[in-house]
Image: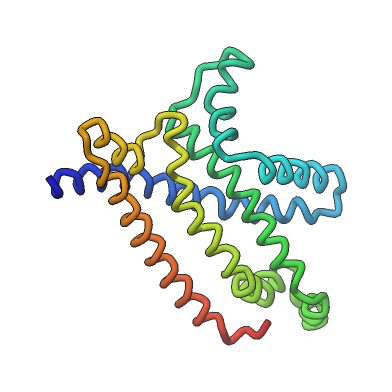
Amino acid sequence: MFLPVTLQLLEGFWESLKIFGLTLAFALPLGLLISFGSMSRFAPLKWLLRGIIWVIRGTPLMLQLMVIFYGPGLLFGLPAMPRFTATIVAFSINYACYFSEIYRGGIESISKGQYEAGQVLGMTKPQIFFKVVLLQVVKRIMAPMSNEIITLVKDTSLARVISVYEIIWAGESFIKKGMLWPLFYTGAFYLVFSGILTVLFAKAEKKLSYFRS
């Protein structure tokens, strides 16, 4: 019975991995754009984005999933988007807002003197950001970013609230067959994947250690 259970859990874990991967693919660049907007000198844009960040960070991801999936139909009579698409949209917006604050903290931690030194050397603002500032920012945000990404691994289980198949759903399905251990077995998948990510982030931090905070 162990092999069939493992195969079914692997199928569910593959769906969880897709949620994880697509969320990062959209949320990481979107978060950077939001962070630039939240630091903008254009006050309406700055406060609009900071208001959105406040709402997203202050409400549960589960609620956001339900609003994005059910909201368009209930509020405007529009057809509901596919459940998996709604999941990716909700997760991407949620994590982009969290990432944006991490980016903002990292960017604002760089002293203005480094920008001024780059300008004295004749560098443009994009050159200063990408050649001088960016790697230092990456080093400084590595720890909080890794925490959020590992949290995302576990948050993928929330997708089941709008009936998206993932590993917890796969494990729970065995309860109807009188078996509880497959549900606990799902924890091994999370632990192994989180462990792999932890090791990778530790190696990345070590490689960036030549930047002194």
At horizontal 44% and vertical 27% (from top left) the residue drawn is 82
Examine the rendered structure and indicate whether residue 178 appears above or below residue 40.
Answer: above
Query: What x and y, as percent, mark residue 23?
Result: 49, 47
Examine the rendered structure and indicate whether residue 60 appears above or below residue 210.
Answer: above
Quadrant in the rendering for residue 94? top right
Query: What x and y, as percent, mark residue 6?
Result: 20, 48
In the picture, measured across the screen, residue 153 lies left or right of residue 11, that is right
The C terminus lies in quadrant: bottom right
The one of 181 and 204 positioned closer to us in this rendering = 181
In the picture, measured across the screen, residue 123 lies left or right of residue 14, that is right
Examine the rendered structure and indicate whether residue 36 appears above or below residue 9.
Answer: below
At horizontal 82% and vertical 45% (from top left) the residue drawn is 47
Query: What x and y, as percent, mark residue 10?
Result: 25, 48
The one of 131 and 48 positioned closer to us in this rendering = 48
Examine the rendered structure and indicate whether residue 25 appears above or below residue 168.
Answer: below
The image's colour scheme reads: rainbow
| Total marks in image | 0
At horizontal 82% and vertical 75% (from top left) the residue drawn is 112
At horizontal 60% and vertical 70% (from top left) the residue drawn is 138
Query: What x and y, as percent, mark residue 26?
Result: 53, 48
The N terminus lies in quadrant: top left
